[in-house]
Amino acid sequence: MSTAITRLLSRNKASVGIVVYELTDACNQACKFCYNYWKGGDCPSKMEAPDYRLARRTLRRLLRQATVGRISFSGGEPMMMPHIHDLAMSVRFAGTKFNLLTNGTLLSDQDIEIFDNLGVGAVQIPIFSTDPALHDEITSLKGSWQRAVSAARKVAAKGKGMLVPVLIVSKMNLHCIEEVLEFFHNELGANYALINRFNIGGLGLKNATALNLTHKEIEDMFERANRTAQRLGMTLQSGVCTPLCVVDPQRYPNVLFTNCSTDFARRPLTINFRGDVRFCNHSPKVLGNIHKTPLKKIIESATQDEYFATVPTKCAGCKLWERCRGGCRAASEQLYGTFGEVDPIVAAES
């Protein structure tokens, strides 16, 4: 291929740092907090069986249309996808890094070995309690704790920081933060973990009363997590952006906080196996489909869309706006049907 053609193709490609690639809608668990938008509402969408051929075709199109730094396989539950290793190999052949976001219950010894050989960057596995019964209650799958922990131990044994354990905190497991973080560190050898507050959406809409945290409980959550991380020498990261009027990150130096940029040139994108592009994996709004419109054009159009430029009324004039951006407004989309409202957590009982 000539240099001129290569340059022309490169100019027509999008450049994306991170893509969360939802391989399937299907999942073997029904976590009470699950934010997948297709599981919410009075009439949740029917989950289709994993479609390998479509997922492969979409992935190939993505890699033709964009230079991607890292692709995170997600779902649903990505390990329900047949031939997932072949998809991972395609990603690696394209020079792109990949992560796996899984509940761990379907992860076999062979899977772990293959992903290790392919150079997986991280395998995220959530563990919600050191009490198997409570974990299983949250996931709605008996035996899920034992299988997830078994997989986590085997991934951790590979070293290289491959395992990233995840703790999602709701009212159901707020009491056991210290025990879980100690388990991550002492039993799984993790010095880094994700800790996220419950963020409403999906099945969580139906279970909000049992899950929602008050402002004081969120502060308590991060205070205890910060204190435990300092004691254990761990670094924690909160992947769910929280409004700065609810949580002041400076109070928790051992917890890294993220904010939600609307700059499409810098933010991660979510793409599902059908080719639908979304703002993030919490947002239900489809920006376009890469089988119909090139990703670069979808991103350019979204960048100019006033939909994402709206400042919520409660945030107008706030000096923290540029840092905060109103928290997770994809949660507002799920609860209120609009991106123009501040994160629903602001209205939670303080």
Image (cartoon, rainbow, N blue to C red):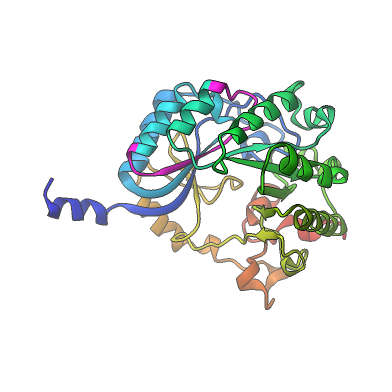
Can the viewer see residue 13 in this picture?
Answer: yes
Residue 142 versus residue 99 in the image, above or below: above
Q: Residue at x 77, y 21 (%)?
A: 142
Q: Residue at x 50, y 32 (%)?
A: 23
Residue 218 versus residue 149 in the image, above or below: below
User: Is 106 contained in the magenta span?
Assistant: yes
Residue 297 pos. (x, y %): 35, 54
Give the left or right position of residue 316, taking residue 53 as reference.
right
Q: Residue at x 63, y 38 (%)?
A: 36
Give the left or right position of residue 46, taking residue 52 as reference.
right
Segment tinted magenta in the rendering: 93-109
Residue 126 versus residue 307 in the image, above or below: above
Q: Nearer the viewer, residue 286 or 56?
A: 56
Figure quadrant of residue 292: top left
Residue 221 versus residue 102 in the image, above or below: below
User: Is 185 contained in the magenta span?
Assistant: no
Give the left or right position of residue 83, taking residue 261 as reference.
left
Residue 132 pos. (x, y %): 81, 28
